[in-house]
Amino acid sequence: MNGNSVMFGLEELQDLVFIERPIRRSLKTAEEIDQLTVDEDLNDIERAVYLLSAGQEVQRVSVITNLPSLVRHNPAETFRRVVPKVRDVLNGSGSEIHLSAAASFLTILQDDIILIHTHTYCILKTVLMHLNHRDTVVGGAWLETLLSAVSSLPKETIKQEVLNPLLFQPQASLSLHSRLTNCRILGKVASKFDSHTVKMELLPVARSLCQDVEAEVRVCMCAQLESIARATGVDETKTHVLPELTELAADEDGSVRLVAFDSIINLIDMIDADDRLHVVVPLVMAVCEASSQGDDTVLTSLSFQFGKLCSGLAGSLSDEQKFSMLQTFKVLCVAGLQTDRNLTNDVNESKLIRCNCCYNLPAMVLFCESAPFLSELYTTFSTLCCDPEFSVRQSAAANFHQVVKLLRSNVHLFHKELVVLLQDDVLEVLDALMTHLEETLEAVLSREDNNKFSELLSALLAAEHKVGGSLRWRLHEKLLQRYSCLARLLPGEVLHQNFSARIFIILTSNKVLPVQKEAARTFCTFLRYNRKQEQRQEMIHRLIKDLAQGRSYWSRLRFLDVCETATEIFSKKFFNKHFLVPALELVHDPVANVRYKLCQLLPRLRSSLRLPTDRQLLQQLDFCVQKLLCREKDKDVVATIRKTVLELDKLDLTEPCHRRQEKDFLDEKKEKEELLLLEMEQLEHQSGGRNPEKHAERKYVCLTGKDGKTRLSAVKSTSVSVSSSGAGNEMRKAKLTRSRSLSSQSTSKPTNAERAMKIKEFSSSSGSVLNGTSVLRSKTCETSSHSLFHHLRCFIDDSLRTAHFTLTSQSTSSMPFLICSNTSSLLENRTSSKDHGSSKTDRRTNVLDHRTGLVDHRTSTLDHRTTALDYRTRTLDQRSRTMERGCGVKDSQSRKLSVHRKSKSFCVQSGQE
């Protein structure tokens, strides 16, 4: 114990000695600071020249990195003084300066900031000078700079500075690095020239490099033959390029054969049918046979290109060859699973081959018909979905949606595989499946068997539990976002019983804010498309009770988040009815954070109000603002409410008119859909036990699109109404006709012809009411009289607002008409002039002049008509009071006769007009 204490004391002393050491206050000494100091009076060019000449390496790197900025501001002086210094610095400098210079020169060449050809030549000459640098990393950086700048350089400059030195050099005398560089340059510059130049100048050099003694050079040149072939065209590819690739496909080196095979597959669209049949197909069959024997040289490339290869050769293969291709694909799908090799490289390669097979599954579905796929490849597909390597299962999950969409008629066969992927223990597999889960569920649930339905729902819930219990909150957010599509794919009862409760638990218990907001959006989506009134009320009641009135301030904050989401999903009318008042009541919340959140939400709440309907709600909102302004003590809330008040004042002024119209149109669309859902619920109640879900689906289609946005795609059927008598139905028709005419007048300005038709419609409807009812109540008659004359008054006001008369309106429309003796002569004159104009075509000009003269007369008679309208209104009021006093049958008959004559007079006048 004493020895341990002594050792412990010595360690403490050493720690104290280390602490008491003098600490260096600066990273640079005074001498180093003097060396790094530059005169402040120097301009940018002089400072750059000074640092490149006498500065340290870090200063030189800084100047070279800033070279594009110097070229933009002062190109002449930069190229005259700075660029020569940079070229001098590059000679004998380290790799860091070379890498910085390569990046800066590439920026200068690509940004079009060089206006003089000599400047381009200066930069390009520097790049070409260092292509064969002794350091391969530096040489590769300069080569990438050149290849990236080729697309930005003029064709003449490329030919003169790049291509000519390459063409006139004997390739055999160059170093290996130089020949590899020339291969890449040939492939890059081929697209800049026409086919004749490529054929005569580039193609001979490329063929000579394909015969190089070094396999590395042959590989590099073979990879560039695709670019040269596309530059030469189909004919030259058939004559020169394809024979060269075929020869390279039989090369002794495996890497050369691999690149040649890839190039042939990539050029399959430029190979004609004859060459496909006699050249490509035998080559492919030989490769497939070699792969079945365990040749690993082209196995990985074949598995990656297999789908593209089958699609390109589908029309050139016989049935036997197609069967052989399918057998080869099946062998590739189980590569590494039936062997005893345990080497790491082999295991990784076999895993990559099976992943490539999963990638090519959709192409194989197109290659063979659905029946051969189910008989030949279904077992293979199921094996890939249950592969022991999670990366293979992840690739299968990523392509699952494409397979089920292509095999939609037999999608029920993939139920087991979907459940297996949903129950996978690796979250990466679920992540890949969730990316296109909406498309997958839409295909699967459209033909899902009822016996397997519950199993799929259990798998979906289990996947959510598994992701929710992990720390992958981004995946949980993604899953909740995808589950919102269930609102249009599952029946409302199933959705409410299985998913709504779980989403509400996530909303009230999860601690991650993005997950909470996504859960709120999904819950509101479920609420939006739930057709059961009782279930909607239950869900809203739980929101208000557990969140808005919750004991935790955290719950009340979540309710405000729900309100923010509800304004985007629901119509203004629905939101104001269920969410607005509980949100405004939070102004009395004792926690400042809740009031702060409410202040931020007030502009959104104000924009949901529609005046004058929501005048009372507007008063409550104003009271809420006044309370916050007068009684709030928290400084952050005070600052926020003051800012909010300014936003409320500018709310109706800053937003453009067309934007408000778009919002009103969308809100009206949402409101119509909500009314449609209510009618669907009524139909379900009326259908009784006759399978209400299917009964409603026969009359309505889904309200939402695939993208999750709200769409009104429902076709509204005629609602069933039960009336006690025929008179009641006629009365409803008359009131509905009047209300529709008034609403149409408030939105758009009708023409005079349309007004005449409306009055005729009112007269007929009022006549039908009188004919269908024996005794009318005085209150109903008085209401109908006032509605009729309110319509006439609006009709006259619209006529007074008409500021001009066109020739069309003069010939087809008429002024408002009243029962008045003074207007009969005017109507007769107009009728006679119109008949005269229609019978005598050569006198139309005189008739038009006469009509123009009548305009002033019409204007003078409007005042008289308005007076007549007031007199008529008083007369009908007196009649309605008389009708109230009269109770006998005789008075009822006289009232009916009077109104009937009135309607006939309206019809006669409208016909004359």
Image (cartoon, rainbow, N blue to C red):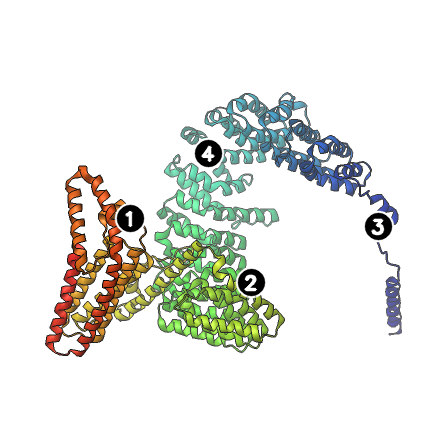
Label located before the other in sequence (2 or 4) = 4
SS class, disc 1: loop
Upstream in sequence: badge 3 or badge 2:
3
Three-letter residue code for mark 3:
Lys
Q: Which circle's residue, 3 or 4, is located before the other in the chain?
A: 3
* Point 54% across, 66% down: residue: 645
Disc 4 target residue: 268
**Type of amino acid at the residue the image marks with label 1:** Phe
Circle nearer the N terminus (1, 4): 4
Mark 2, residues whose alpha carbon is within 10 Å: few (<14), some, or many (≥20)? some
> Real-space Cα distance between discs 2 and 4?
45 Å
Q: Position of residue 431 (x, y in %)?
A: 51, 57
Q: CA distance from mark 3 to mark 4?
A: 64 Å
- The mark nearer the N terminus, 3 or 1, is 3
Cα gap from disc 3 to disc 2, whole angstroms: 47 Å
To which quarter of the image does residue 580 belong? bottom left
| Count of numbered labels shown in the rendering | 4
Q: Position of residue 5 (x, y in %)?
A: 87, 72
- Taking the spot 41% from the left edge, 48% from the top edge, the residue there is 377
Q: Which residue is mark 1?
A: 805
Query: Of callouts 1 and 2, which one flags the residue occurring earlier in the amino acid sequence?
Result: 2
Residue 28's disc number: 3
* Quadrant of res 89: top right
Local SS, label 3? loop
Q: Could you tell me if the residues under marks 2 and 4 are in contact, i.e. CB atoms within 8 Å?
A: no
Disc 1 and disc 4: Cα gap in Å?
A: 70 Å
Q: Nearer the viewer, residue 229 or 776?
A: 776
* Between marks 2 and 4 in the image, the one whose residue lies nearer the viewer: 2
Three-letter code, disc 4: Ile
Q: Which residue is mark 2?
A: 473
